[in-house]
Amino acid sequence: MRRIVSIVALGLVLASCSSNLPQSSLNPKSVEAQKIDGLWILVFSIATVIFFAVQIALIVSIVRWRRRPGDDSEPKQTHGNTRLEIVWTIIPAVILAVIAVPTLRTLFELRAPATGDVLRVKVTGHQWWWEFEYPDIVGPDGRPLITANELHIPAGRTTELEMTSADVIHSFWVPPLAGKRDLVPGLTTYIKITPLESAAGEVIPGQCAEYCWLGHADMRVKVHVDAPDDFETWAAGQLEPAPVPTTGAAVGGFETFSGVCATCHQANVRQPDGTVETIGTAIGPDLTHFASRDTFGAGILENTAEHLAAWIDDPSALKPMAPELNDLDRGRVLGMPDYGLDPDQIAELVELLESWK
């Protein structure tokens, strides 16, 4: 039995030594996350000192005043000790006061409005995906940069997220970058993120942290922390319209997209004659640069032709959704339906979407 306990204890200790912390507040990748981590270390350190002080006092008391063999005397009965009660009331109050000062200071710093050269991103939570709009990054046609599920932000610069929900309460949570903030219908909440320059090039995972029904566990998000130049390149590419194909299987895919997918999805496209137009309805994710994303389905599937074909064929088999409850007249979508496309149509649609980089 002792050996089993030792093995379990050793396993727990070794598990805690892992440096792979993709979704941990103790692996800060931003200025804000460092403040949260610093506060946690302070509170944990104080709690550790208190824990050992109490344990030592307990052990000393047990050993020193234990009942010894042959000693049948009754211990001295004490009915109250005013001095002791005052001391053990004052000490916790002082400890809480010490903790309260840095806690409140950190809260005020995190909730203070972002200032200076700030990148604004409007975040809208949907069941079950994320919409990101960059209102200050606008194309020649006046259309702002809009993408879904994968957020790009520059390292070393503050990004302020203006967040709301299109349906129920969601919660944006990317632990290495910032704290948790709810997205509430009809209300705008804010969170700021200043990624460390050393985090450039990293892709940091997060997820919805407020239960929002069927697809909650699969409502994930990926934050790409780009070097400033890489971010500018990415943003410029995202503003370019997707080309309407003129040859190959993608031509049939565009016909399917226009007749089926555009019921819920938008795309900003350039026609063969050079004209640019936005087609479709902005109910689901914008698909203009679908192939530029590493994942889809709100971060649950790697963006490959095989996964995309399986998704189009039967989306609810890969992610819990309720498309039977969709109400397009009210803009209410609870999942992508199975439209019954045949294998050729699916292959053509995959060809189209994989070409929209």
Image (spheres, helix red, strand yellow):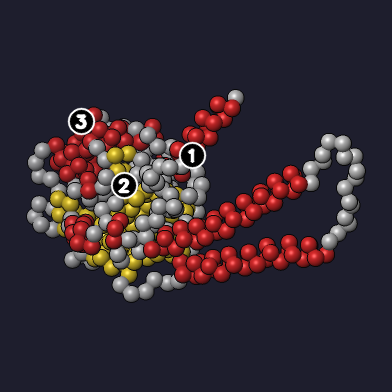
Mark 2 vs 3, N-terminal side:
2
Q: Tell us which disc is closer to us: 1 or 3.
A: 1
**How far apart, in angstroms, are the residues tagged by discs 2 and 3?**
20 Å
Percent across and percent down for residue 42 are 52, 60
Amino acid under disc 2: Thr
Q: Determine whether 201 is above or below 355 in the image.
A: below
SS class of the residue under badge 2? helix
Q: Residue furthest top?
A: 1
The answer, for residue 222, to whether it is visible in the render is yes
Please give the residue where the numbered disc 2 appears in the rendered image. Answer: 263
Picture disc at residue 344 = 3
**How far apart, in angstroms, are the residues tagged by discs 1 and 3?**
54 Å
Mark 1 vs 3, N-terminal side:
1
Other residues around mark 1 within 10 Å, as few (<14) / some (14–19) / many (≥20):
few
| Quadrant hosting residue 82 | bottom right
Percent across and percent down for residue 228 are 23, 62
